[in-house]
Image: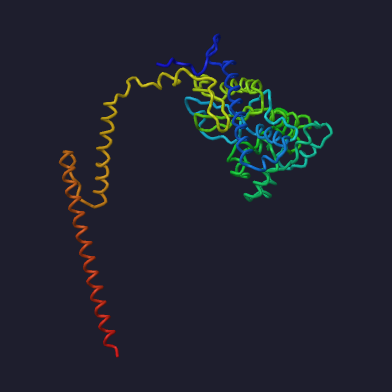
Amino acid sequence: MAPNIALTTKPSTGSPYQLNHAQTERASTALLKHIKSEQKRKDAESSRHSLLARASSDDDEKDDSVEEDDDVPIWLVLTTKKHITDKKKLKPSRISIPHPLFASPTTSICLITTDPQRPYKDLVADPSFPTDLRPRITRVIAASKIRTKYKTYESRRQLLSQHDIFLADDRVVTLLPNLLGKTFYKISSKRPIPVDLSGGTKARKAAATAADGEKSRAKPVELANAITRALSSALVYLSPSTCTSIRIGRASWPAEKVVENIEAVVPGLVQTFVPKQWRGVRGLHIKGPNTTALPLWLADELWVDEADILDKPVTAAADGKKRKAEEQQAPREEAKGKKKRSGLEPIDTDKEGESEVRLTAELSKAEARKLSQNADENRKRQKAEAVAKVEGDEAQEGVP
């Protein structure tokens, strides 16, 4: 008999409701190693079967492989014992991470704002706006412009392909699902990320709105800080299910970066969004797009409250009796429905067995009468058609 091997290891000291650093590092290292080996195998197969791949230079092949690795995301999968929320939320929540997913200086950012869009363009062009962030913001557009310019599916797909990241003012981000449609929201890689473009606290926003009658706006430095915080966060999309996936890294990263992001996301994720917090967590895993999920933490119990457990187990005999009763009840209900549709007289149901026999007999007689009537009508119709055909032939023969 094979020995029992634990899939995960809990911390040796402290509460068991926490991640084990060694377990997280081991799983991350194994996952990244597997993804890179699979990528090398696919590259080798494609180079053997493609003349173009063999003709390409070594530098180009190296650059292409790096870009493909950068595009492979690493997901943290949270499994809960109950649904994490009651309805689907298209506006994601954010959790800060030490290693941003969108740190490349070559990424293109589209900033979606409230009306009018000109003040936000001026903020980005202001000299006090950080020079390292300004070239990445390639477009600033208001939500009303999206409504008028991007009505067709082709135009929305073109907008999606022109930019790598979409940031949206949190005051209009809930309107974007109707404006952008399934082109953006069918997948989560380019859904607009909410960002606070108003600046300051709620009190400052209300005071500014009451003072000048316009929507409050952030200063150039505040706008830059808000954009940086949004880009340095992991996005949490909640839905009425027991499984939630959060992108926390890339396959080209070293394992240390992935581990640090996981350890930064898990506490906020569990304490903020999971009912009963760690008691409501069933498991934590990491995986790639096409890999097996590797466990980080697994719960010892499969329930939250003692009330969720049945006092008496359901035996096979009791389950069989219940199933047999349901099977017997189904034809009775069907027979009652047929009785009402056929217009038969109601039958006394005090004696269950006798009533079923009588009902079946009455239904058989009614169906037999109906079939006999239909057969008589068909014979009369066929006879009439035959007589009419004969008379028509005789009339045609008598015509000179």
> Would residue 283 be seen by someone viewing this image from the given angle?
yes
Q: Nearer the viewer, residue 73 or 38?
A: 38
Residue 41 location (% of width, % of height): 60, 32
Q: Is residue 400 left or right of residue 58?
A: left
With 88 as the anchor, is 189 left or right in this view? right
The outermost residue toward the bottom is 400
Identity of the residue drawn at 78% across and 35% down: 134
Q: Residue at x 51, y 26 (%)?
A: 79
Residue farthest toward the top in the current orientation of the protein: 13
Q: Is residue 392 above or below residue 74?
A: below
Instruction: Tell me residue 275's x, y (percent).
Output: 51, 23
Q: Which picture quadrant has residue 392?
A: bottom left
Q: Identify whether 318 is placed above or below 90.
A: above
Can you give x and y, in whole percent of width and height, for residue 374 in the image?
A: 23, 61
Q: Please identify the quarter of the rendering in which residue 18 is found.
A: top right
Give x and y (percent) for residue 210: 72, 35
In this view of the protein, which residue sits in the foreground, 332 or 289?
289
Q: Image quadrant for the N terminus?
A: top left
